[in-house]
Image (tube, rainbow, N blue to C red):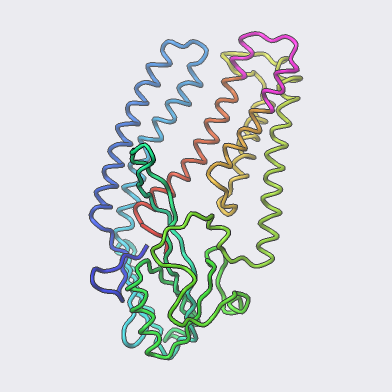
Amino acid sequence: MMEQKENEHLVFTNEMPSWKIKLSYVFAGIFLILGVIILYFSWDFTQFRDGWNIFAFILIGGLGFFFCILPFYLIKTMKRRLKIHTKEELRNDGYHFFYYDEFTKNQYHLNMPFENMEFVLISLGLFEISQSYVDADGDVEKQRIKKVFAKIHIMGTLTEGNEKIVGISIDKKDTFDVWMNLFQQNDVPIYYTEYGLNHISLTKELFNDIPMKPYEGRLPFTIGKALYDPYDELEFLTDGQKDKHKKTRKYIRLLTLVLGLIQIPIVSLWLPHIEIENAIFDSDLYGAIWVFTIFALLFANLPRLRRRWYEPLIDMTKVIVGVIIGTLFIREATEEFYDALFLNYFAIVFLYLAVIYFFQFRNWIRQKLQGSPQ
């Protein structure tokens, strides 16, 4: 997110506030300590659990190793970002963008004079924040809400002769008014839409399909207001995108349902006849199916699908329900069999959810470090 310079309504930079830098070091220290503690207990745990040693150390030790590596990733990401300097500015002669990378020494300057601007479009933007409130019992609770900002899209031609659409996010009403006044003083047409435009790749031709109205000093949304409605319902999508999105989500739900149903014959008809060694089903084919199940579940959560945070839990529930139903058809099974069954599917649950929520947590950390989206 481009940070607004204090008392400068027309200048935005990517300078990271000192409190964000300190916060990243605090997080790194906490995660490193937590990782070391988990690694210690994973080693201690495996010394006294015959048959569970390998899986226990891989699962618990893997979690500890993850928390030990995460701090270095956070610090590396932060330091890399601190070496990139950008500045957006609206001057009396137009829009300016400056970029400089200390690491690669790459730098450039883009300029779009007011006379080269065809029009400005204002769209809805939302970013998540944590808000505290007092419940009926007097306890302080926190909840995630979405706060409104205005996304300004400027369509025009750069001084180099290239057509370009530039976007600026503004979350303060007074700053927004200053930008609008300068556009109006230079006779730049201004339009607005009540939708967000984050799910589409903006082109000059696509603007004809976006419902927009001339801006006359008022917007259908309030900058800085908290919203509780799902963001996806406020996003503009082309008809083709809507149909494709619905079909893809339908296929993904069907895929995870099939994965759950497959577990019934696997558990009830096949696994009871496989030898067990050290709480592991001794079968290369089952190992291949195990890996396929993990990758199929991960495929269902490709970033482009924008799934809800709880949907991976629903996926896992389908698989577990399939396993439970499968055990109902088993006539005879040993305690060793149920131990192996639990351990193998616990590994699937752990690895799947760990990977999924690692990326969700990473995005959350990035949001905390960078602020609202640009």
**Quadrant assignment, res 238:** bottom right
Question: Does 153 sit above or below residue 64?
Answer: below
Question: Does 243 sit above or below residue 279?
Answer: below
x, y percent for residue 28: 30, 41
x, y percent for residue 331: 75, 11
Secondary structure that dominates the magenta span? helix
Question: Does 313 sit above or below residue 156?
Answer: above
Q: Would you say 313 lies left or right of 98 here?
A: right
x, y percent for residue 105: 32, 67
Give the number of callouts: 0
Q: Nearer the viewer, residue 190 or 204?
A: 190
Residue drawn at point x = 65 percent, y = 63 percent: 241
Residue 149 shown in magenta: no
> What's drawn in magenta, residue-wise?
322-341
x, y percent for residue 319: 65, 31
Q: Nearer the viewer, residue 289 or 132?
A: 132
